[in-house]
Image (tube, rainbow, N blue to C red):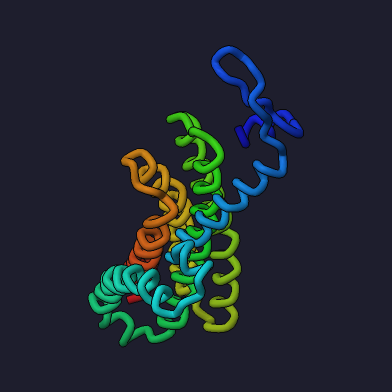
Amino acid sequence: MARLISQYNLTSLPVVDEEMRLLGRVTFDDVIDVLEDENTEDFLKISGVSEDEELSGNWIEAVKSRLPWLIINLGTAFLASAVVRHYGSILSNLTVLSAYMVIIAGMGGNAATQALAVTVRRISLYDLTDNQAYRTVLKEFTVGLINGAVTGLIVFIFAYFFDSNPMLGLVIFLAMTGNLVIAGITGSSIPLVLKRVGIDPAIASSIIITTFTDVFGFLLLLGLASKLLL
């Protein structure tokens, strides 16, 4: 109903029974209230916060709603930590990589969140066909590739002049580009997959995509450094 009003710029829609007798109408402001409630709910779910917490403001309820997701996130963070431990000898020889790790992970997380927010919004408004879902992922792949190349080039220039190491800049450029591509793919495909299997994509997506961008961001940076800089 909200989709019809939005698509055709209607001010109201009639509500009729099986015999087409008018029972009432749904106005535009009623639909706006529903959409606002749904958008708020999705935003809170993506953040790992329940709607009840927003209404009550009780700290006990806040801990109950947030702590389980933080514990899950802590578990996934250990995966990224394991990657860093595995390449500990490289970090010992190239301590400058530690500074760029933060940039790679942060940019990947932000890009994935952008793709996730747009995709969850699409899912909430439309029943995406398989072809539309494919085009959504393809679009986010393209966006990630371009954004990764541009931001990677900026960091490459910084590393070239500040660290006087063009090979370091190349490693960072490749890692940044690769991680933002992964961010686009995971940020768009994971909510689509969760929706397909009957799981609310707004609830679990953010935890999963953060794991992907952190793990693969570190893998790309440290793995490439081990091949090209040592």
Q: How many marks?
A: 0
- Tell me the residue at 35%/68% (across/down): 69
Residue 185 visible within the image: yes
- Tell me the residue at 57%/19% (across/down): 17
Picture layout, residue 108 above or below residue 119: below
Picture layout, residue 204 above or below residue 133: below
**Splitting the image into 4 quarters, where does residue 62 fall?**
bottom left
**Splitting the image into 4 quarters, where does residue 12 fall?**
top right
**177, 116: nearer the viewer:** 116
In the rendered image, residue 70, in percent from the top left (x then y), is placed at: 35, 73
**205, 59: nearer the viewer:** 59
Left of 184 or right of it: where is 4?
right
Residue 83 visible within the image: no
Check the picture and name the quadrant holding the N terminus. Answer: top right
- Tell me the residue at 68%/28% (across/down): 13
Q: Which residue is farthest top?
A: 19
Left of 115 or right of it: where is 197?
left
**117, 155: nearer the viewer:** 117
**Splitting the image into 4 quarters, where does residue 98 fall?**
bottom left
In the rendered image, residue 124, in percent from the top left (x then y), is placed at: 52, 43
Left of 211 or right of it: where is 123?
right
In the rendered image, residue 136, in percent from the top left (x then y), is placed at: 51, 40
In the rendered image, residue 67, in percent from the top left (x then y), is placed at: 35, 74
Check the picture and name the quadrant holding the C terminus. Answer: bottom left
- Tell me the residue at 59%/76% (across/down): 158
